[in-house]
Amino acid sequence: MKISMLRVAAALIVSAPEIARPAALQAQQGRAGAVPGWAEFTRAFDAYADSGKVVGGSAVLVRDGRIVARHDYGLADRSRAQPVNDRTIFHYGSITKTLTAIAILQLRDRGRLTLDDRVTSYIPELRRVHDPYGAMDSITIRMLLSHSAGFQNPTWPYKQGKDWEPFEPTSWEQLVAMMPYQELLFRPGTRWSYSNPAYIYLARIIEQLTGDPWETYVQKNILSPLELTRSYFGATPYYLAANRADSYAFRRDSSGHDVLYDYGREFDPGITIPNGGWNAPLADLAAYAAFLTGSTHPDTALARRYDVVLGRASLEEMWRPVLAVGDSAAPDGGPESMGLGFFVVDRGGYRLIGHTGSQAGFLAFLWINPATGTAAIAALNTNTEVPGAKNALAPIMRAMLALLH
């Protein structure tokens, strides 16, 4: 299924007056008195969201496995005047990559693979990619996890918004057919360069070893044991459809005006689901953050389930820096590194672990402070695709990360 062709929700010019929001839809303060700095953060959230003309969004602060503060803003769906609430389902884009990385570490810990295995042992089709370095057979699973294999960033070159274009490639065969027209961009293992195809290749390895489609494997081995019951991939289940957020993006039209387009509630990430297909309410992301921080509230059964998913030693291994990413990519401008599927940020005395996501108008982030058991999670349903324009996620993220200490 390809995306419904960016139907226009409203020809909203950026210079036009702000979108009016009924009083009942004004953002709610989330337990501001109980969390130092939360009231200030929610004011910053609203200011950045207003300036970016965000239609709707949410943020939660998690401590010791529990949501201690929540802030909802605006509308999940403009056409239905549906406000964002604690049931709203957002799309998390590349945060999905952390699930793929955990699945690979699970298989490593179960003796099914090693991180230094050659990728071409599992995916011989990759030898079709143009390789000016003669190094394709040297690419390892570890390199895919750390975005250092030399593959390109995008999975699909068709991004002009034409009716015949699919949103993303829909089958493995399509990717294989394109391989002779791609090339390695640098010698594998020598530097970092973000790559979506790398995580499709990791998913392919998971499927080859287990016989399960990636979605089925992750459901059985991560989502179910963590009881993330409202998380899903692909089309929204019928019983959750009423809570699915619509998504929007500003795009420049032929007359030079910046117009708000409606992506629709549903879109098909195709074969790219392992690098960007997770849908859920923020509460499921909070439960995932509780697993990452090991917050079990002296619940031995929960602790056992955490260990079934992945042991603490393996998580810590994933959070060790492998390659420098560079200051410009860090959420607060500080030094940032890439681990195995997770970004690592040094904030001068403590570290943050996490990932961001951006796809089809949705924007999101999840960051944890492992030392304190705290997590910051936010999602927006509005992005900007206007050249040179900045979306609201980065300043919101900087404001929220100040609470993770």
Image (tube, grey):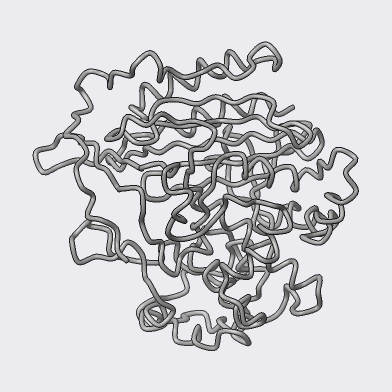
Q: Which image quadrant is residue 41 in?
A: top right
Q: Position of residue 190 (x, y in %)?
A: 61, 65
Q: Position of residue 363 (x, y in %)?
A: 45, 42
Q: Position of residue 148 (x, y in %)?
A: 59, 64
Residue at the left extreme? Answer: 255
Would residue 299 appear left or right of 29 to someone viewing this image?
right
Q: Is residue 88 above or below residue 114?
A: above
Q: Which image quadrant is residue 335 in?
A: top right
Would residue 345 appear left or right of 120 to someone viewing this image?
right
Q: Position of residue 180 (x, y in %)?
A: 38, 83
Rendered residue at 77%/60% (across/down)? 309
Would residue 403 appear left or right of 307 to someone viewing this image?
left
Q: Is residue 332 above or below residue 181?
A: above
Residue at the front extreme? Answer: 239
Quarter of the picture holding the C terminus:
top right
- Count the labels in the image: 0
